[in-house]
Amino acid sequence: LATSTALIGSGNGTKITVASTTNTNFSVLYGNGQTRVNVANLAIYGNKANQGAYLQYGLNLNNVSSSTFDNIDVRQFTSDNITLISTGASTYNHFSHIISEYASGAGLYAQSGCDNCSIVDSSFNNNLQSGIIGMGFSYLSGLTIDYNTGYGFNPDAGSSIINSEIDYNTLDGIFIGSTYGNRIANNEISGNTNAGISMSSSHDIDVTGNFINGNNGEG
């Protein structure tokens, strides 16, 4: 990826598939320090069933800021489908109409946060770890986070998730640990194997207007 450039496909007709037995650690799309990047309308498939034990990512953003990612279908990577890892946090990025499924890691892992980022109208389902991890001081709305083997959503401090569906995850629907300032509002949180919402060593958490039903743990 490069600053002030666009990579625009034609939807699922523009599909990047990793070749079988690609025996190396790599990312299909990698950004390092860029701003004002626009990626849209494409599919990225990791073909993990035919890969070895390597760290392979669909989208890897390292200190990328003020960029937009729209209508991207990313799935089947040996690690996280989407990862944000940086010496300085990636900020002011907007994700919309993302499908992130069937990763061996998380659907999206913001290892260094993503301050002032947003994710809207997207789905993070059937991943072998959590649906979304991190995303501190960010806004999430209109998401479907279902059937992940870990948590549905495990946020960093200050993030808000509203008007979303977080169902049938193997651990808690939402787990808030050692953070503060989160908002959880008007979500459906149902059928998770543990709690619908679980908190540990957290404070100043706003939980309002949620439908929480049929979870096997408390809350």
Image (cartoon, rainbow, N blue to C red):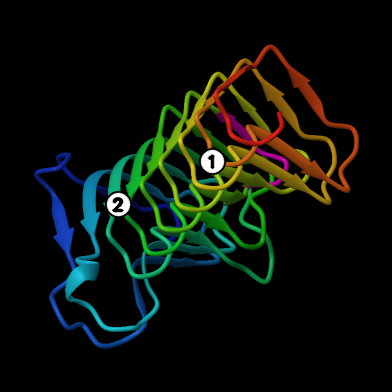
User: Quarter of the image holding residue 84?
Assistant: bottom right
Q: Which residue is mark 2?
A: 74
Looking at this rendering, what residue extends furthest in the front direction?
216
Looking at the image, residue 47 lies above or below residue 108? below
Please name the amino acid that badge 1 sits on.
Thr
The structure residue drawn at horizontal position 36% and vertical position 47%, both measured from the top left corner, is 126
- Residue at x-position 65% and y-position 36%: 217
**Among all residues in the image, which is located at the extreme top?**
209
Earlier-in-chain disc, 1 versus 2: 2
- Look at mark 1 in the image and give the residue it sits on: 193
Whether residue 112 is in magenta: the answer is: no
Amino acid type of the residue tagged 2 in the rendering: Val
What's the residue at 77%, 39% (across, down)? 158
* Closest to the observer, 33 or 26: 26
Q: CA distance from mark 1 to mark 2?
A: 26 Å
Residue 199 visible in the picture: yes
Judge left or right: residue 181 versus residue 65.
Answer: right
- Is the Cβ of the residue at disc 1 closer than 8 Å to that at disc 2? no
Q: Is residue 24 above or below residue 14?
A: below
Magenta-colored span: 135-140
Query: Element at badge 2?
Result: strand
Is 45 left, or right, of 182 in this rendering? left
- Does residue 215 appear left or right of residue 76 in this picture? right
Q: Position of residue 178 (x, y in %)?
A: 83, 51
Q: Which mark is residue 51?
A: none
Q: Residues within 10 Å of mark 1 (few under 14, many from 20)?
A: many
Chief secondary structure of the magenta portion: loop
Tell me if residue 96 comes above or below residue 33 in the rendering. above
